[in-house]
Image (spheres, helix red, strand yellow):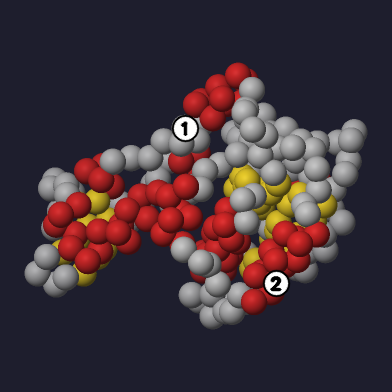
């Protein structure tokens, strides 16, 4: 169980520079215990994740549109059926793991496009895939100039403001935080949620009459 998910979501960020060291045994054990304790996801599917360490000095993980990622050799991944609901279920679990890692003072980077041959030793049943992986480890105290430029170029810390993604009754009327009532904090967590390239492709409309949210 996550101790304080709201606080953890607000401080988690994507990291691209790691210390070249394995995870401490006690940290690895706690992370394993958390992963194994996760029940079925929102679509009633349970996914088995693995924490993999690869010490490969002559081959690095190739990623697309994630910039330079240094000193990484700890990864979390699992397998999902090749359909939309299974991928959503996978993402739900992976976000929980990311937040638990953050609680343990670990750094993470969520990777959706990568060279799958890097994990060729990971058996994939027919009809299944690895939708995404997490790079995990200890962050460097201060990223290099090149790494800071990479974070800037991929909008690693950027998030849209409320008026860009939340609306009231129609797409012409932005929803302001005070109008969200008891859902204000929940919507703020949605605003901070990770997305590919931090593009935040979702849009949400609150229908006042029906007190219902519509997700696009």
Residue 155's tag is 1
SS type, badge 2: helix
Give the residue at x 67% y 29%: 68
Instruction: Please state which of residues 18 and 154 is positioned toward the viewer in this rendering.
Output: 18
Q: Position of residue 118 (x, y in %)?
A: 81, 46
124 left or right of 79 in image? right
Q: Earlier in the sequence, mark 2 or mark 1?
A: 2
Label 2 or label 1, whichever lies nearer to me, is 2
Quadrant in which residue 56 is drawn: top right
User: How far is the residue under mark 2 from the one under mark 1?
Assistant: 33 Å
Q: Is residue 123 visible?
A: yes
x%, y% of residue 206? 19, 61
- Disc 1 on helix, strand or loop? loop
Q: Residue at x 65, y 66 (%)?
A: 80
> Looking at the image, is 41 positioned above or below residue 13?
below
Q: Residues within 10 Å of mark 1 (few under 14, many from 20)?
A: few
Numbered label attached to residue 33? 2
Quadrant assignment for the N terminus = bottom right
Judged from this view, the residue extending furthest toward the left is 209
Query: What number is the disc on residue 19?
Result: none
Expressed as whole percent of the image width and height from the top left, the position of residue 83 reads: 57, 66
């Amino acid at each position: 169980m996550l101790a304080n998910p709201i606080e953890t979501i607000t401080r988690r960020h994507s990291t691209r520079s790691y210390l070249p060291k394995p995870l401490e045994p006690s940290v690895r054990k706690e992370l394993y215990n958390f992963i194994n304790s996760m029940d079925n996801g929102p679509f009633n599917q349970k996914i088995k994740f693995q924490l993999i360490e690869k010490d490969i000095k002559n081959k690095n993980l190739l990623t697309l549109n994630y910039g330079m990622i240094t000193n990484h050799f700890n990864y979390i991944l699992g397998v999902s059926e090749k359909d939309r609901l299974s991928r959503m279920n996978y993402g739900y679990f992976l976000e929980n793991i990311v937040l638990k890692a953050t609680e343990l003072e670990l750094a993470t980077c969520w990777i959706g496009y990568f060279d799958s041959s890097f994990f060729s030793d990971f058996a994939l049943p027919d009809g299944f895939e690895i939708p995404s992986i997490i790079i995990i480890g200890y962050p460097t105290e201060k990223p290099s100039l090149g790494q800071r430029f990479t974070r800037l170029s991929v909008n690693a810390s950027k998030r849209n403001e409320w008026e860009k993604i939340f609306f009231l009754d129609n797409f012409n009327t932005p929803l302001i935080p005070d109008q969200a009532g008891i859902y204000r904090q929940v919507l703020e967590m949605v605003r901070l949620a990770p997305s590919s390239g931090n593009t935040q492709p979702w849009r949400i409309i609150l229908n006042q009459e029906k007190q219902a949210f519509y997700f696009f």
